[in-house]
Amino acid sequence: MQRAFSSSAEELSQELEQLLESFCSHEHQKFCLQQHVATHQQLQRIRQTIQQVRSLIPTVGLTHNANSESLRQSLMRTCLEMLEYYNAFCQQRHIRALSQDTVDQLHIEWQEISHTFEPKAKEQGDFRELLDSLKVLNKAWKKPRHVSRILASMLATYELKAGAYIVSIDRYNHSQLGLKSKAAGSRQIVFECGKLTKEEQMEIIAGMCGRFSSIFAQNARSNLAQIETQIQKGRLTSLADKLQHLQEQVYANMSEIVGGGASCNQDPALHEGHRFTTMISPSLWYPEEAINVQTIPLPSFIPSPWEWPDMLKTRRPFQPMLFGLIARRRNANGSFMKQLKRCFSSASPQPSVMTEKEEEEEIYATLSVDRLSRHLVRAGRQFYEDIATSVELKYSQDATALQELGRDIVKIYGALKMADARCSMQRILAILHDLALLDCQSNVENASSHEAGATSVLTNTT
C-alpha cells in the first residue's frame, strides 16, 4: 500500500512540475502580458512565489514532511490568485468554461482552419494578378487597331448582297462616291441606294456585327471561365462557416451571457494597471450571393436605333474643281462660271432639278470600316469594364473578408491558449488537492500502524 502511494504521489509531483515549469516559462509570461491578463508586477510576484516553492519541493517535498502542508498551502493560494486572473480575462471576453479535452479538440479544429487559411491567402494574391491582367485587357480594348484587323479579316470573307461593296478609297474614286478627299486611304462599306433599301443596308451591317459578336463571344467565354474558376478557388464561404462554428464553441453568445449574469464580486486589483477588451459575439460578414461573371450577358454589337444616322451616311457623287476646293455635283444645271458665281454669291443656290430615277442612281450610303471598328470597340470595352468592376468588387469583398478571418483566427488562438492555461491552473489545484488527500491518508495509515504496534507490544508484555 505504501509503495502504491509513493508511486501515485511521484507521478502527481512530476505532472505538477511540468505544469509549473510551463507557467513560469518566458513565452507564457509574455503571452499573459500581451493579453493584459495581469500587470507585470502581479505576474512577477506570482512567478517568483511559484519559483520559490519549486526550489523547495526537492528538499521539503509535498508529502511526508511536517512542512509539506505549509508548502502546498502557499502554492495553492498563489495558484488560486492566478486562476482568478484567468477567470476574469475569460469572462471579459466571453470565453466559455472548457474542459481540457474540449480545448485540445478545438485546437485541432483551429489548426485545420489555419492550414486552410494559408492557401486562401495565396489564392487572393492570384486573384489580384488576375484583376491586373483584366485591367490590361481592358486597356487593350481602348485601342481599335486589333479590332480593325479582326474586322478586316472578317470582311475579306464576308458575302455581300448585290449593291453592297467593300471599297478602298483613293484620290480618284472618293468624289465618285461623294466622299471628301480626306477619306482617301480608308476602307468604306458602300451601298447603292437604288438597289438596297435602308432596312436592307442596316440588315447587312447587323449581319457583320453578328459575325463579329460570335468571334467576340468565343474569346469572352474563355476569359470569363478563367475568371470564374479563380473566383471559385478563392471562395471563403466554407472557411468562414468553419470559423463561425469554431467561434460558437469557444465564445458564449449574448443570450448565454445575459442569462448567466456576470460576477460582481471581483477583486478590484484585477482591473488595476491594465484594461480589458470586451469581445461581443464574433461577427463575420461575407456576401451570401456569389458574383457569377459567366451570367453577365454578352454585349450586342448591333447599333442602337439612335446610332444608325451617325453611322450610315448618304453620299452624292460630285466633280472636284479648282484642285478639289469646289465640289460640283454631277448633272447639275449651269456652266462652270455660273457654278463658280453661285459659290461666291450671297444668295442661296437653287437646287438641281433631277428626276427620281437619276437621283436614285447617284445616291450612295457609306459606312467607314474605321467607324464600324470604333463602334465595336466601344461595345466590347464597355463589356470588359463591367466585368472588371464586378471582379474588383468581388476582390474587395474577399480581401476584406480574408482580413477579418485572419484577425478572428488569431483571436481564437489566443482564446484557446488562455482556456488551456486556465485548465492547466485548475489541474495544478486538483493535483495539490490530491496530494493533500494522499498525505492525509498516509498520516492516518502511519498512525494506525503505530497504534497497532503499540497494542502488540502491550499484549506481549502482558
Image (cartoon, helix red, strand yellow):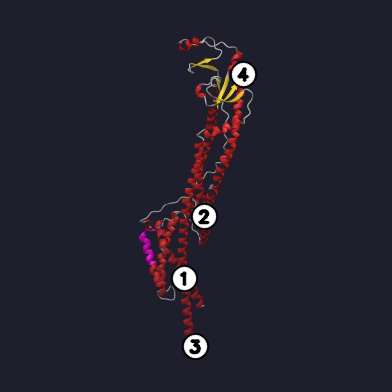
Between marks 4 and 3, how big is the CA–CA gap?
A: 147 Å
Residue 194 numbered tag: 4
Q: Which residue is mark 3?
A: 459
Q: Give x and y (percent) for residue 321.
A: 50, 16
Between marks 4 and 2, how big is the CA–CA gap?
A: 74 Å
Q: Are marks 4 and 2 in contact (CB under 8 Å)?
A: no
Name the kind of residue labelled 3 in the image. Thr
Residue at (40, 67) in percent of width and height: 50
Name the kind of residue labelled 1 in the image. Gln
Q: Which residue is mark 2?
A: 115
Of 28 and 12, the residue lying toward us: 28
Residue that sits furthest to the bottom in the current view: 462
| 215 over 38 or under it: above or below | above
Q: Are marks 1 and 2 in contact (CB under 8 Å)?
A: no
Of marks 4 and 3, which one's residue comes earlier in the chain?
Answer: 4
Provide the secondary structure element on which disc 2 rests.
helix
Say whether residue 392 is visible.
Answer: yes
| Stretch in magenta | 37-49
Name the kind of residue labelled 2 in the image. His
Badge 1 local density, few (<14 within 10 Å), some, or many (20+)? few
Badge 4 local density, few (<14 within 10 Å), some, or many (20+)? some
Of 315 and 35, the residue lying toward us: 315
Q: Is residue 200 left or right of residue 18?
A: right
Of marks 4 and 2, which one's residue comes earlier in the chain?
Answer: 2
Between marks 1 and 2, how big is the CA–CA gap?
A: 34 Å
Q: Are marks 4 and 1 in contact (CB under 8 Å)?
A: no
Name the kind of residue labelled 4 in the image. Gly
Q: Give x and y (percent) for residue 116.
A: 53, 53
Residue 14 numbered tag: 1
